Image (tube, coloured by chain):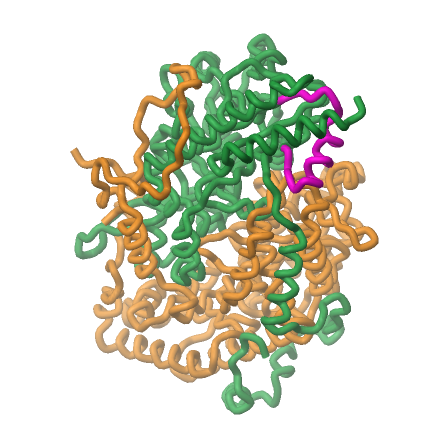
Chain colours: A orange, B green
Amino acid sequence: MLIFEHSQPGRSNASQQFHGGSASAIPAQLRRQSKPLLPEVSELDAVRHYTRLSQRNFCIDTHFYPLGSCTMKYNPRVSNALAMLPGFLDRHPLAPDSTGQGLLACLHQLQEMLADVTGMAEVSLTPMAGAQGEFAGIAMIRAYHRARGDTARTTIIVPDAAHGTNPATATMCGYTVVEIPTDSNGDVDLAALQAVCGPHVAGLMLTNPSTLGVFERRIGEIAEIVHKAGGLLYYDGANLNAILGRVKPADMGFDVIHLNLHKTFSTPHGGGGPGVGAVGASQRLAPFLPLPLAGEEQGSYRWLAEAQRPQSIGRLSAFMGNTGVLLRAYVYMRLLGKSGMRRVSEYATLNANYLMAELQKAGFELAYPARRASHEFVVTLKKLKEETGVSAMDVAKRLLDKGFHAPTAYFPLLVPECLLIEPTETESKQTLDAFVVAMKEILDEAHATPELVKGAPYSLPVRRLDDVKAAREPDLVWKKKG
Amino acid sequence: MPFIPHTPEDVSAMLDAIGVGGIDNLFDEIPAGLLNGSLPNVPEALNEMQVARLMTERAEADGRYLSFLGAGAYEHHIPAAVWQLATRGEFYTSYTPYQAEASQGTLQLVYEWQSMMASLTGMDVSNASLYDGATAFAEAVLMAVRANRNEAHRVLVPSSLHPHYRATLKTIVGQHGIAVVEIPFDTESGRIDRDALEAAAAEPFAALAIAQPNFFGVLEEPDALTDWAHGKNALVIGVSNPMALALVKPAGEWGSAGADLACGDAQPFGIPLSGGGPYLGYLCCKQALVRQMPGRIVGATTDLDGRPGYTLTLQAREQHIRRAKATSNICTNQGLMVTASAIHLSLLGLKGLESAAAASHAGCRKLLEKLIAIPGVEPVFASPFFHEAVIRLPVPVAGVLEKLLQQKMLGGLDIVPYYPELGHALLVCVTETKTSDNLDQFSDALANAIKESPC
């Protein structure tokens, strides 16, 4: 039932009404005549409705969530509690810097810590999600070439295993996208890279470890090829969890990067955001970082703007990006500290390799059996599909019945019938073992009673939804019947 | 080890199962020269109590102020239930609802929010949110340029639209070679200068943006502007603080056909100021434009048993399907802010929202009366306004604001850096959170600060 269907004409919530207002000074021709669709419910109606809706969700707090490339680790409650302290929550973004020294101190130190773990010269916190971080990075690459009078570079190279945001970002920045293939071991095809490089190439976007769950071993050669052609290297930090505290993207030759603080640094996904896509840059690209930046001089902090950074690509938001999310990441980093950073990649990698080994023993086929897993790995169900008709989607849906969120399915696109599985470091061996048991059960079901798996899920608020109908007859807003 | 549950027994059993001697062996594919564990700028770990002490000290050091700042970020009452519900783990720690069957709570909530936003803006459809008002505006411009068959890569944007929205727009659409033509405002009324607008229309343009209310709080006359732009084969983008739409005619109802797109920031609907974010960009449009929409959209459908359910839909526009040909690169948006906003709107309902908007509007009128009674203070524009207004002081604004700050007051925004042509101009905002006593405190303090300022 929708909130609108709980409405009763004339019912309202008096404790959320305010007195002394009048709109009579607004000229009639400017005033609203129509009545907007808003619920007419009591406070209890609303609280009960949204509490019940919440119970129709899977979440990290209730379920194991092995979504590849999404890093669904535990989101510490204390990060939320401290980011919502009144002093931070009530701060107006345009209040003078002198009244925001506490906040600015946190953000400045967050910039420093992120620069340290990535090896970059400087970090800007303003991008509000990974895709906006990518946009910032590619716009910086463009600004760098232009500042040198090099306007012939029109192309961005993207491996075929890349996240969809990579090519979409390059297009948004006015570039032509060239995709290069991956070889059978999951590495970038160096000959193909060499063939497309030239004076028209602005840069290469790369995730390392890649979305195939393997570390790109020849990253040194890749960097050399691209740099020799005059291009720059962009690091998509979606998989930083795999190498945190152990390998720095700057040492691999990357010039500019983005980090997903809602992945590696444990800020909540919130059902689809808000995130943060902080960007880091090497010395030569730092002048182009987006604004504002938190600056420090003799213990006093202030926002740096156009006057201090004339070469910046500019603003990406009305104010300072997703400040509240930044505070949550800051709290998390202080709780982990120096040695905690390295433990993240150690245990994320241990969990992934253990789960990969156990699933292989249980009869699942690995996409890259000869490789170590990074913090994630790819299983392919191509044979299962051929033998039983049960697809990766079916297995994913059946997992929901078994009390586990599904792994990422059908990504990366180049592995048929794939599941991309990322357990993260915050899950215990016991949870991973239970997941293997569930996967083994599904494998057995697929052979014995394939229709059972194909019809899943059965135990959720709805069964499989008609996506075709949703797209063919879009019903995107509620309208009162009759 | 914070947040890592492994016992030593677990670790050795896991390493045995993998068949390696130690965790370090798992990294043996990484070239040795790349290993670099030095982190000089990350301090040692603190426990929860120590971090709490540090953060509490910093939050309290920032102090509390009686604030008359608005300019795109507004202090409103937020019911206690909003964030108690929004931070339930089921909302707070869930992922993007790609697995629809396991995400019906979030999906239905977004569908409800889309319905409320489309109705508030007078549009047919809404997407599931964009980052903030400034990026929603940039996406609206890109969408209008894509959708308009006249193929003009030129948009008209009033200089009375939020300066930071215009700056963001330039960062984003500047990459596409889209020309942003700024239309000056009439210095008497604070509204779009019609002669300048007419002159700018000498060449084709894809869209006209109209801010209602504009950055000065001034209400434009959007009916005539909308019809005028449509007559020039341009689309119209309404940029509104959605709180104003409880009282003011929404973009979808402007002129004879309505504007084509409506966007802005829904921060006033239950989102705390929080130093500038996270906020909540919204984008609504007419039905004909829906396939040009950026970002996620939730639709209603049915399941195998015919029961109603909700799912992400029209995904053929999006980056994970279309890659380089997507309508936008946006992926993660502001889901949790949508949750808070939908709950907020449900708790207030129509009456609550109207009363908050009306109390804010009336409070601003009352304050303005008091302020212009101070010798030397005058209103800058002679037009109706919503809950913000620009006044001119007889002395430089910065010094006055500094004096108010010493009395724990944020006296508004000094807009001299943005609009030097307006003289000593101060933008003030009042919401329902301000009492009559607050207004008196402010006007008394302002009068004193002016008196003590050198002219």
Give the residue at x 39% y 70%. Answer: A63
Examine the image and state in which quarter residue A257 appears. bottom right
Whole-percent x, y for residue A24 in the image = 40, 19
Q: In the rendering, at what x and y percent does residue B4 appear?
A: 54, 77
Residue A43 visible: yes
- Residue nearest the viewer, comparing A129 with A419: A129
- Is residue B396 rendered magenta in the image? yes
Looking at the image, can residue B113 be seen? no
Quarter of the rendering containing residue B90: bottom left
Q: Nearer the viewer, residue A250 or A2?
A: A2
* Image position, residue B278 (x, y; %): 54, 48
- The single residue placed furthest to the right in the displayed view is A298
Residue at 73% x, 63% y is: A116
Left or right, A367 with reference to B35 = left
Location of residue A87 with respect to B141 vertically, above or below: below
Query: How many numbered marks are there?
Result: 0
Q: Is residue A373 above or below residue B450?
A: below
Q: Which residues are magenta?
A: B391-411
Quadrant where the image shows the C terminus of chain B: top right
> Who is closer to the viewer here, B80 or A4?
B80
> Nearest the camera: A373 or A98?
A98
Q: Is residue A349 left or right of residue B34?
A: left
Spot occupied by residue B62 in the image (x, y as percentages of width and height): 66, 51
Image quarter of the N terminus of chain B: bottom right
